[in-house]
Amino acid sequence: MKPFAMAALGNPTMALPTVELLALAQKHLYGNYRPAPFVLHSGRGAEVFDTDGKRYVDLCAGVAVCAVGHAHPKLTARIAEQAAKLLHVSNYFFNDENILLAQELTAASRMDRALFCNSGAEANEALFKLARRSAWLKRGDSEGVIVAFHNAFHGRTMGALSMGGTPKYREGFGSIGGVVHLAFGDLGGVRGLPADVPVIGVVVEPVQGEGGVFPAPEGFLRGLRAFCTDRGALLLVDEVQTGIGRTGAFLACHHEGIEADAVALAKGLGGGFPIGAMLTTEAHAQVLTPGTHGSTYGGNALASAASRTVLEIIAEENLLERAATLGNSLSEMLNDVARAFPEHCELERGSGLLRGLVLREGFVARDVLPKLQAKGILLTAAGDRVLRFSPPLVVTESLLAEGVDAIRQVLPTLTAAA
Ligand SMILES: Cc1ncc(COP(=O)(O)O)c(C=O)c1O
């Protein structure tokens, strides 16, 4: 048998020219994404650099992930230190970093228990399994209905996909069923569900991120809390995009002062190191008993150490306050843009450092991104017409202004589709 050998014979760390990297990507990476035609290589704070040395202002932070920015010295050192000590032992054994993370995270989120996984979709799967098994324990079947909302995004696994409220994402995949989709923000619609519909849970994002940066209207989460309490259903809050300080509170549902039954976290939780979590209150601590749910990597020592360090940095650098203050500045800047370019922009909206500039009908946000990239600005699109800002929480006002200025230059070059 031929022995295994590295494909890049010779020096595997040798830098390849960008064109060769792009050709390799074209040939070997699965085509389920549409990445920009350059290759990122390093970063610092809210700036990243490609393999040609070009600088970009990173105002997306890997879609709301790199909360403490790129190459934060404390996080980098802590990951290296932990990697030299212990990476992984599985959940057959405790690891100290994971126990300490659970303590910090439950305190910051005002929840009681943490179940760790590796991504947002997985955290949501845990929420759905919690609701189903909880109903099964209470009434002997797990066939009840979870209320979810139009336009919601909960991830790409089959359970999470089924809860998502954008039908095109389900095309060709179907749904696991047991979900009713209602209008986001319409409490009347939720309350109007007939009493004989066996609602076992309501899953909601405090700000719909992927769907187009729609903050829940004031009172909506409080109303859902009351509805769930009345109906004996679980309030499941998906804070994958909004959690860990992005909106200026540790959890966005804290703005409404509500207590969820369970919360899904991921993205900012590891600052770029993959980790997710489901947090629950004590009342739900006995639902997922040993053998009913788990994940090999969930809560591994390296991910836990990284996450604990992210929480430390957030506290030390006052990043919640910073997200709120800079979010206000960004909101003002984007409002000015919307006023200056009324034929291109409808409005801006969002919460803290999760904000969207909504383009008018006829403009496609995804098509604007390459023009911004050419000017050294990285943003993402949310929904069809929203330019989404989800920068590192350590971003500066001047970097935000640089991004907004690029938008001002690009908008006049756009023409709306008829
Ligand atoms: C609110 C929300 N939930 C879940 C997910 C899925 O997270 P992941 O891609 O880590 O599975 C996302 C990702 O964008 C999200 O924004």
Image (spheres, helix red, strand yellow):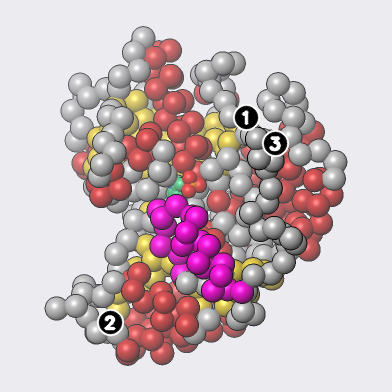
Frontmost residue, 203 versus 121: 121
At x 41%, y 77%, the residue is: 370
Considering only vertical position in the picture, is 338 above or below 142? below
Distance of mark 3 from mark 2, alpha carbons?
Answer: 47 Å
Res 300 quadrant in image: top right
Residue 300 bears which disc, if any?
3
Q: In this view, does 91 lie above or below 310?
A: above
Q: Which residue is drawn at 18% across and 28% down?
A: 194
Q: In this view, does 10 lie to the left or right of 121?
A: right
Secondary structure under the numbered disc 3 in the rendered image: loop
- Quote the CA–CA distance across marks 1 and 3: 8 Å
Q: For this rendering, which residue is in front, 23 or 172?
A: 23
Q: Can residue 328 be seen in this view?
A: no
> What amino acid type should be assigned to the residue bearing mark 2?
His
Give the residues in magenta. Answer: 17-36
Residue at 31% of width from left, 30% of height from top?
A: 176
Residue 77 falls in which quadrant of the image?
bottom right
Q: Residues within 10 Å of mark 2 (few under 14, many from 20)?
A: many
Is ligand 1 less than 8 Å from the beta carbon at label 3? Answer: no
In the image, is the residue at mark 2 within 8 Å of ligand 1 by its beta carbon? no
What's the residue type where badge 1 is placed? Thr
| Count of labels in the image | 3
- Magenta segment includes 28: yes
Residue that badge 1 annotates = 296
The residue depicted at 26 percent of the width and 36 percent of the height is 174
